[in-house]
Amino acid sequence: MRVDVSRVVAGDVLELELLDPSDGDARVVLLPTGKNKDACEPVSLPVSVAGTRARAELGPVGVAAGTWAVRWVGADGAQRPVLTADPCYDAAERRAQAARPAEREFLAVRTATGRLRIRVRSVKPYAQVDRVDTASEQVTLSGRLARTAAPDGAGGAELVARQRDLDGELVVPVTLSDGEFLCTIPLAPLSRAHDHGRHHNEWDLWLRLPGQDRELRLGSHSDDIVGKKGRIGYPGVLVQTPDAPLRFRPYYTDKDNLTVLAVRESDGTTDDGADQADESDFEVA
């Protein structure tokens, strides 16, 4: 079965724009792949067809985390792979998807041979970073809440910067409105807490919401760029200290979370060199 558009839209519904005709009496079957191949049974989903558009609900069905091959089953009962010309990514739809509270995420994925897959993964609330601005001795961040509802009221939100493996902590106020946040991190307090005995210092960033015990890690996950570390960079900011000038730079970790890195400028260490440090012992989810 050939399709022109293949997306997971609001309500965790697989939506297909058909290029091949369908008599309306059809189903979609999800076949487990990879680690689920021998552990899970195929999942059959009813399909509603209106003209060239077909829709199948994914949410109510217990589909395990993993990648599933999509098959189209017509009136003759034969299973046919769904072949798509769609890159399976829509920025506006992914933004809308991230805005909905959920514990699971369904993503349409196109293989190198054009076959449609559904990727299912567990998700938890986080703070999606949309923009990072560096200026004189400060970093300004803006973004939105992801996979969680916005709290009632607009006051009381805070950003917490924690010095990794050390006890430094900075709390700054956050402007929060309709699920979108804006905050500025002053770098002078971070420079005063800098441990000059370490090759580099990292400050992991968390959003603390009013009336909630949990904190949301800042990161960038609702796009199609996986592995931002080494691919996306931001300008550094030089801050003078009595011991040595420090260069601060926001960067993405191995898990696409946002952290502020600080290195001694006088060490001759470049941002790129510090970024290659092994984070396996102190990576934060």
Image: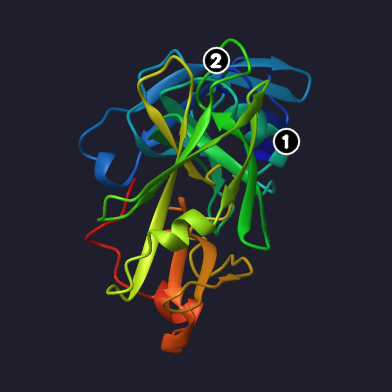
User: Residue flagged by tag 2: what amino acid is it?
Assistant: Pro
Query: Where does residue 127 sit, x and y in percent of width and height?
Result: 52, 36
Residue at image position (46%, 63%) is 191
Place of residue 252 in the rendered image (x, y in percent of width and height, measured from the top left):
49, 58
Left or right side of 41 for 226: right
Is the residue 120 above or below the residue 23 in the image? Answer: below
The residue pinned by badge 2 equals 151
Query: Is 111 placed above or below 48 here?
Result: below
Q: Is residue 150 something that shows in the picture?
A: yes
Q: Is residue 88 visible?
A: no
Specify few, some or many for label 1: CA neighbours under 10 Å numbering under 14, 14-19, or 20 or more.
few
State the residue in front, 252 or 177. Answer: 177
Give the numbered dot on residue 92: 1
The tag earlier along the polypeptide, 1 or 2, is 1
List x then y, in percent, for residue 201: 37, 65
Secondary structure of the residue carrying tag 1 is helix
Kindly give the residue lying farthest to the right in the view shown.
51
